[in-house]
Amino acid sequence: MRAEYLEPHGFPWIVGFSGGKDSTLVAHLVFDLLLSLAPDERRRAVHIVANDTLVESPLVMAHIAAVQAEMRQAAEAWRLPVHVVTTRPDPDATFWVNLIGRGYPTPNRSFRWCTDRMKIQPTSRYVRDQVAASGEVILLLGVRRDESALRAGSVARHDNGQRLNRHSDLKGCMVFRPIVDLSTDDVWEFLATNPPPWGGSHRALIQLYRDAGGGECPVVTSLDDAPSCGTTSPRFGCWTCTVVEKDRSLEGFVEAGFAEFAPLIAFRDWLVSIRNDPTRRLARRRDGRITVTDNGVFVPGPFTLATRAEILDRLLALQEQVGRVLISADEIARIRRIWAEDALQAAHPVLST
């Protein structure tokens, strides 16, 4: 990492930070590296980029926000060229705007519309902005072969034998995987025995894993990484995730004493239960087409307006019950605008086209 940072060019580093153990280790090592350099050697900017889908597990986002605040304070105190940022989905592409506004059925393995809109696009947009400003960027990811056979296969496909690999989707972006060959035990041993350079300790992170019984959904910047989001493993990510059969991490938080999250699990399970109810789905897709597969299977369209209204009513009641903001006023306004447009089109299909 030191040799790469001291290369004689000005391309900034972008660290994908999910708040989990692997990305935390990479961020830790980057801070250590910068602190080991003389001030005049810290010539290249480092962007530590987290992603908030706006439906993340509340405990996870609280942890990420706390660590980000510590990072910012440390970077300012030490005058490090570190920028700590959070990307979010476009206001018109959030989970609730698509689900409740447009009536998209809840995501599953064959129709996982959430990952691209809520994770890939926001972070990729930030990366492209930095490429436009600097000509090229280096993206540091905390991926490891030891994570899973699937991850090992993905690493092998992109390994060119060099320190940097060109990103498969983002032009001008090189990928650096500094901990690719570390084992899970290596990661935990380091974090348990070395306090973070931004202050405090990694105890809160370790406790988060213990409570969840799982791991984080990683930063995703390409469709190749998408299978890591919404797998059968007990990862913590979006509390609304319906790609998994059971949200084991959120269940783990409840079992660890965070009973206030039990209603979130019940709401998520209800969303799963209504997905394939034909009485809750329109016959036509939003573009007016009727879809029938090659095997002759009819694929229903979006949720009906009545079902969308019911989801919103239940979500607002849930929000009041748990005392947390689960949907923003801006999202509600956008949803109602989409409903009005859909109602107009249904009443006057010729005029609306």
Image: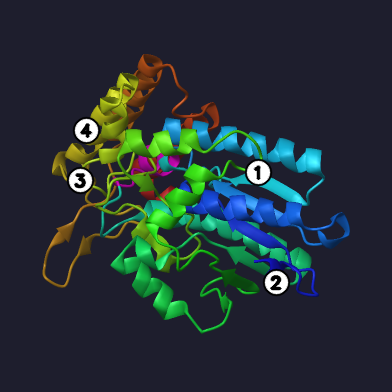
Kindly identify the residue that appears in the image at 40 percent across and 51 percent down.
114
Q: Does 238 sit left or right of 77 as displayed?
A: left
Question: Which amino acid type corresponds to the residue marked 3 in the rendered image?
Answer: Glu
Badge 4: residue crowd in 10 Å (few <14, some 14–19, many ≥20):
few
Residue on which disc 1 sits:
197
Query: Dividing the image into 4 quarters, which one contains the N terminus?
Result: bottom right
State yes or no: discs 2 and 3 in contact (Cβ < 8 Å): no
Of mark 2 and mark 3, the one earlier in the sequence is 2
Residue 238 position in % (x across, y down): 39, 41
Q: Are marks 1 and 2 in contact (CB under 8 Å)?
A: no
Residue 217 location (% of width, % of height): 40, 50
Residue range in magenta is 96-106
**Which residue does the numbered mark 2 point to in the structure image?**
3
Q: CA distance from mark 2 to mark 3?
A: 44 Å
Q: CA distance from mark 1 to mark 2?
A: 20 Å
Q: Is residue 118 visible?
A: no
Tag 1 or tag 3, which sits nearer the N-term?
Answer: 1
Q: Which residue is mark 3?
A: 245
**Kind of residue sitting beneath label 2:** Ala
